[in-house]
Image: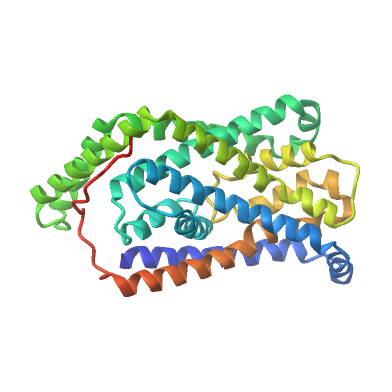
C-alpha cells in the first residue's frame, strides 16, 4: 500500500502541474476584467442545477454499487455506496485514463469486509455497462442529430475515433474476464508464481489456494448475475440516467449565461461526443484535452464567451467535485483506519448468501 500511496501522490502532483499548464495557456491572452464580469452576470440558479446534475451522476453510481452488491448477498446501503462512488471519482480524477478509481473502491470496500472477488465483479460489470451505455448514447445522438454533429465535430474527429476504438476494446476485455473465469485462474496463477520467484510472496501454495477461493466466489457471483438479468437491466437504466445528468451540465451553463437558440439535444449530443473522445486518453481527469476540446466544439454555442463557459462547465463537472470527493475520501479513510488494522490478509473466508 505504501507504493500505491506514493503513486497516487505522484498522480496528484502531475494533475496539479497539468492543471496549471492548461489554464496558463488558456488564460494567458484573456481579458480578465471581461471574464470576471461574464462570470458575475451568470444566473446562480442554473449553476446549482448543474452541480445537482453531477451529484446525481455520482449518486447513480452509488445506487448501481448497492444494487449489484445486494444481489450478491452483501448488505450495503445506498448512502454507503455513494461514499464509495465519491472515492472512485477522486482516484479516477488523479490517475491516467481513470485507472485508479475502481482499484481504490475495491480497497476501501475490502476494509469494510466486502469480499474482493465480489467487489471486483461489481465494478467490472459497472465499467462494462458504463462503456456500453456511453457508446449507445453516442450512437443515438448521431442518429438524432447526425447533420449537426457531422458539421461541428471535425475539430476532434481523430480523438472521437480513438475513443470509440478504446471503449470497444475495453468492453470486449471486460466481458471476456467476467464470463471466462479460466482466464482469471491462469493469469492470477502466473502472477502468483512470478511474485513467488521474486520473493515477494513467501507461501506460494497458500497464495494459490487463496486465489482459487476468490475465483470460486467470483464464479458464484457471475453465475448469480447471469440468472438475474433484471439486476443488470436496472443498472443499464440507472447508467443511462447517470450519463444524461452528466451531459446536461453545459446546457445549464448555457442558460446560466442567458444564452438561447440551441436546444437540449444539441447540447447533450455535443457533450456526449466530447466525453467519448477524451475519456480514454492517458491523462488524469482528461485535463487539458477536455478543456481544449470544449473550446473547439462548444464555440458554436457560446461564441466569444466560450472560455468562461468552459471554466464554469469544467468547474461544475470536475474541479468542484474533485475537491468534494477528496474530502469524502480522506474522511472515509480516517474512519475506516480507526476500526481496522492497516495490514489486511490476502483473502478472507467470507461466506456468501445469495438472495433468491
Residue ranking furthest to the front: 356
- Residue at horizontal 41 percent and vertical 55 percent from the top: 105
Which sits in the foreground, 206 or 65? 65
- Quadrant occupied by the C terminus: top left
- Residue at horizontal 75 percent and vertical 27 percent from the top: 144
Residue ranking furthest to the top: 143
Q: Is residue 166 visible from the viewing direction of this image?
A: no
In which quarter of the view is residue 77 placed? bottom left
140 to the left or right of 197: right
Which sits in the foreground, 103 or 354? 354
349 to the left or right of 132: left
How many callouts does the rendering have?
0
At which x and y percent is residue 23? 70, 64
- Residue at horizontal 33 percent and vertical 39 percent from the top: 355
- Residue at horizontal 23 percent and vertical 63 percent from the top: 344
Position of residue 206 relative to residue 133, above or below, is below
In which quarter of the view is residue 51 placed? bottom right
Position of residue 178 relative to residue 305, above or below, is above
At which x and y percent is residue 76? 39, 53
Color theme of the render: rainbow
116 to the left or right of 175: left
At which x and y percent is residue 303? 88, 50
Q: Is residue 76 visible from the viewing direction of this image?
A: yes
- Quadrant occupied by the N terminus: bottom left
At which x and y percent is residue 332? 43, 68
Amino acid at each position: 500500500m505504501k507504493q500505491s500511496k506514493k503513486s497516487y501522490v505522484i498522480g496528484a502532483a502531475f494533475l496539479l502541474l497539468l492543471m496549471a499548464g492548461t489554464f496558463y495557456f488558456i488564460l494567458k491572452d484573456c481579458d480578465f476584467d471581461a471574464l470576471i464580469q461574464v462570470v458575475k452576470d451568470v444566473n446562480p440558479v442554473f449553476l446549482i442545477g448543474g452541480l445537482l446534475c453531477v451529484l446525481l451522476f455520482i449518486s447513480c453510481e452509488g445506487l448501481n454499487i448497492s444494487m449489484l452488491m445486494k444481489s450478491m448477498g452483501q448488505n450495503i446501503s445506498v448512502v454507503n455506496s455513494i461514499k464509495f462512488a465519491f472515492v472512485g471519482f477522486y482516484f479516477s480524477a488523479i490517475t491516467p485514463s481513470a485507472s485508479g478509481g475502481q482499484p481504490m473502491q475495491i480497497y476501501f470496500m475490502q476494509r469494510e469486509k466486502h469480499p474482493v472477488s465480489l467487489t471486483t465483479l461489481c465494478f467490472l460489470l459497472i465499467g462494462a455497462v458504463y462503456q456500453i451505455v456511453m457508446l449507445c448514447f453516442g450512437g443515438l445522438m448521431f442518429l438524432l442529430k447526425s447533420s449537426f454533429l457531422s458539421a461541428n465535430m471535425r475539430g476532434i474527429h481523430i480523438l472521437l475515433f480513438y475513443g470509440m476504438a478504446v471503449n470497444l476494446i475495453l468492453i470486449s476485455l471486460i466481458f471476456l474476464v467476467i464470463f471466462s473465469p479460466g482466464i482469471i485462474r491462469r493469469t492470477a496463477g502466473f502472477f502468483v508464481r512470478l511474485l513467488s520467484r521474486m520473493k515477494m510472496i513467501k507461501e506460494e501454495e497458500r497464495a494459490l489456494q487463496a486465489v482459487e477461493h476468490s475465483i470460486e466466489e467470483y464464479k458464484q457471483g457471475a453465475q448469480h448475475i447471469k440468472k438475474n438479468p433484471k439486476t443488470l437491466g436496472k443498472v443499464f437504466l440507472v447508467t443511462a440516467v447517470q450519463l444524461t445528468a452528466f451531459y446536461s451540465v453545459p446546457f445549464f451553463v448555457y442558460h446560466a449565461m442567458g444564452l438561447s437558440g440551441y436546444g437540449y439535444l444539441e447540447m447533450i449530443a455535443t457533450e456526449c461526443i466530447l466525453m467519448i473522445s477524451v475519456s480514454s486518453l492517458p491523462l488524469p481527469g482528461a485535463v487539458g484535452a477536455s478543456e481544449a476540446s470544449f473550446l473547439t466544439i462548444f464555440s458554436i454555442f457560446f461564441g466569444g464567451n466560450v472560455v468562461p463557459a468552459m471554466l464554469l462547465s469544467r468547474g461544475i463537472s470536475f474541479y468542484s467535485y474533485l475537491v468534494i470527493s477528496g474530502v469524502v475520501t480522506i474522511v472515509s479513510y480516517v474512519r475506516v483506519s480507526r476500526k481496522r488494522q492497516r495490514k489486511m490478509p490476502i483473502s478472507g473466508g467470507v461466506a456468501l448468501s445469495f438472495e433468491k
